[in-house]
């Protein structure tokens, strides 16, 4: 019985470097997704502010290349609101990925602490 336990412990210790590498890879991916989410949230914040300003504006302008073109503010607001939906769905997808990665990290940590 003790030889089986010792064999399992030896296998777990042998897997520790591999588990550590996997844990570090998951942590790196989590940091990447967190940075992406933060970027999208900043974009969403800017879009919400622009949308609010456009609802009160009588004129709207769009930058095309190096020139500024006068545009209907209601049309701009509609386009921004559509883009907000896309950005929000990306944020939601990233949050799901982050949750999965956190779960994986916990599993790796349990395995490492158990070994």
Image (cartoon, grey):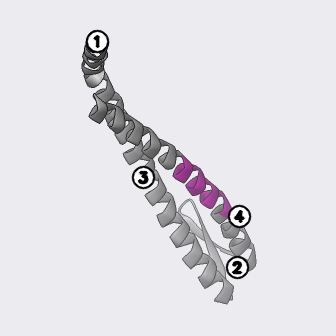
Q: Position of residue 96 (x, y in %)?
A: 56, 49
89 or 24: which is nearer to us?
Answer: 24
Q: Mark 4 points at which residue?
A: 82
Q: Do the residues labelled 4 and 3 touch (CB within 8 Å)?
A: no
> Along the horizontal axis of the image, is 114 left or right of 42?
left
Which of the two labelled residues, at mark 4 and mark 2, occupies the earlier sequence position?
2
Q: Which quadrant of the rendered structure holds the C terminus?
A: top left
Q: Mark 3 points at which residue?
A: 34
Q: Per the image, is 93 magenta?
A: yes
Which of the two labelled residues, at mark 4 and mark 3, occupies the earlier sequence position?
3
Q: Name the residue under label 1.
A: 7
Which of the two labelled residues, at mark 2 and mark 3, occupies the earlier sequence position?
3
Q: Mark 4, mark 3: which one is toward the viewer?
A: 3
Q: Mark 4, mark 1: which one is toward the viewer?
A: 1
Q: Mark 2, mark 3: which one is toward the viewer?
A: 3
Q: Mark 1, mark 3: which one is toward the viewer?
A: 1
Which of the two labelled residues, at mark 1 and mark 2, occupies the earlier sequence position?
1
Q: What stretch is highlighted in magenta?
A: 85-96
> Along the horizontal axis of the image, is 64 left or right of 58?
left
Q: Are marks 2 and 3 in contact (CB under 8 Å)?
A: no
């Amino acid at each position: 019985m003790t030889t089986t336990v010792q064999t399992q412990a030896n296998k777990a210790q042998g897997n520790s470097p591999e588990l550590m590498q996997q844990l570090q890879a998951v942590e790196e991916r989590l940091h990447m997704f967190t940075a992406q989410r933060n970027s999208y949230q900043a974009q969403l914040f800017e879009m919400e502010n622009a949308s609010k300003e456009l609802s009160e504006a009588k004129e709207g302008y769009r930058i095309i290349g190096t020139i500024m073109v006068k545009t209907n503010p209601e049309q701009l607001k509609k386009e921004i609101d559509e883009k907000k939906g896309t950005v929000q769905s990306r944020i939601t997808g990233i949050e799901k990925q982050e949750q999965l990665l956190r779960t994986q990290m916990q599993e790796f940590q349990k395995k490492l602490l158990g070994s």
